[in-house]
Amino acid sequence: MRAKISGLGMYVPPRVLTNFDLEKILDTSDEWITTRTGIKERRIAEEWERASDIALPASKEAIEKAGLTPKDIDAVIVATSTPDMTFPSTACFLADKLGCNKPMAFDISAACSGFIYGLTIANSFITSGQFSNILLVGAEVFSKIVDWSDRSTAVIFGDGAGAVVLTKTEEEDTGILSAVMKSDGSHWGSLHCPVGEKLKMRGRETFKMAIKSMETASKKALEEANLSLEDISLVIPHQANIRIINALAERLNLPDDKVFSNIHRYGNTSAASIPIAMYEAYEEGRFKKGDYLLLTAFGGGLTWGSVVLRY
Ligand code: UT7
């Protein structure tokens, strides 16, 4: 028994905040943000919009593309660091809004690595035979926890949601082939958000650890899947900074066309960044059914991990 991705969906709020808009409220410039991060613009949720609201259209699309209805979903998992409430989980709100039939529902708190963690959790529920269809969503409204007076973090993050449906399959050599997930809580202070406060990050320190951790986890995940980078059609890394993505590509010896990036349009959407990137890469024809993908993420915790899958 394996778990394959049977549907993809995404949603970003329509409101665009460009680097030029930020120039008006912060001591920053489009030139600094572009050269240091690769970001040109990001999306910002409305005042009333919460993570479950932006997760909803992404989820509807993924369920429809999987050829299913919300009633077919056995479990709803939301990876988020910006939940609607401390409890109930964002997943409970989402399942209710979708009209699911009382599925298991819970959130994952693993910051930017949440989607990678979630893939493995969903995969385990399916390969154990417990569930047949799982909705996994990365949904973030970081605009609500960003300190809009801190130029070192305000320019980086954005809001958005990406969703996948994982479905039981008996097809061989398909779905999630390997997963490496790690954490190191001793570095919590590098990137954190105390309850009721705003996000804090020591950027330079996080930057270095991100590259090293994603490189190591990616090599290990490939080894565990018995594959090499030549077998991989596309690497989809967490979209934290274009310089991190480029440094990772260099260390892995990857040509530009094997690494996907859309950070210029959305900034860092934390747990939503990989499913949003996967959605756009698929729509752009960057991979197709049967291709091997390598996904890798890094974030607060610290947490990091890599997944190799066959789409
Ligand atoms: O998603 C999970 C993990 N997150 C990450 O992986 C983020 C990792 N870190 C980064 O992406 C980068 O460290 C940043 C983009 C956050 C910062 O880039 P940097 O090249 O590491 O810059 P820095 O923090 O070393 O700051 C360099 C200079 C400083 O000025 P001085 O001290 O040299 O005078 C900052 O004050 O740039 C200044 N600066 C800015 N200037 C204009 C910091 N932010 C800005 C800004 N506009 N927005």
Image: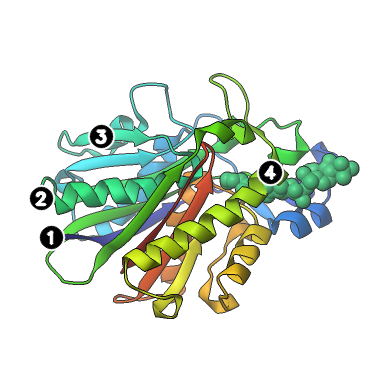
Residue plotted at (83% across, 57% down): 31
Taking 234 as reference, is 306 above or below it?
A: above
Q: CA distance from mark 4 to mark 2?
A: 42 Å
Secondary structure found at label 4: helix
Label 3 sits on residue: 105
Q: Amino acid at mark 4?
A: Glu
SS under mark 2: loop
Which residue is found at the position 26% from the left and 40% from the top? 76
The earlier-in-sequence mark between 1 and 3 is 1
Q: Which residue is mark 1?
A: 1
Residue linked to disc 4:
205
Instruction: Select label 2 or label 3 by which is in front.
Output: 2
Residue hosting label 2: 129
N-terminal of the pair, mark 4 or mark 1, is 1
Label 4 crowding class (10 Å Cα cut-off): few <14, some 14-19, many 20+?
few
Secondary-structure class at tag 3: strand
In the displayed structure, does residue 194 sit left or right of residue 272? right
Left or right, 222 with reference to 106:
right
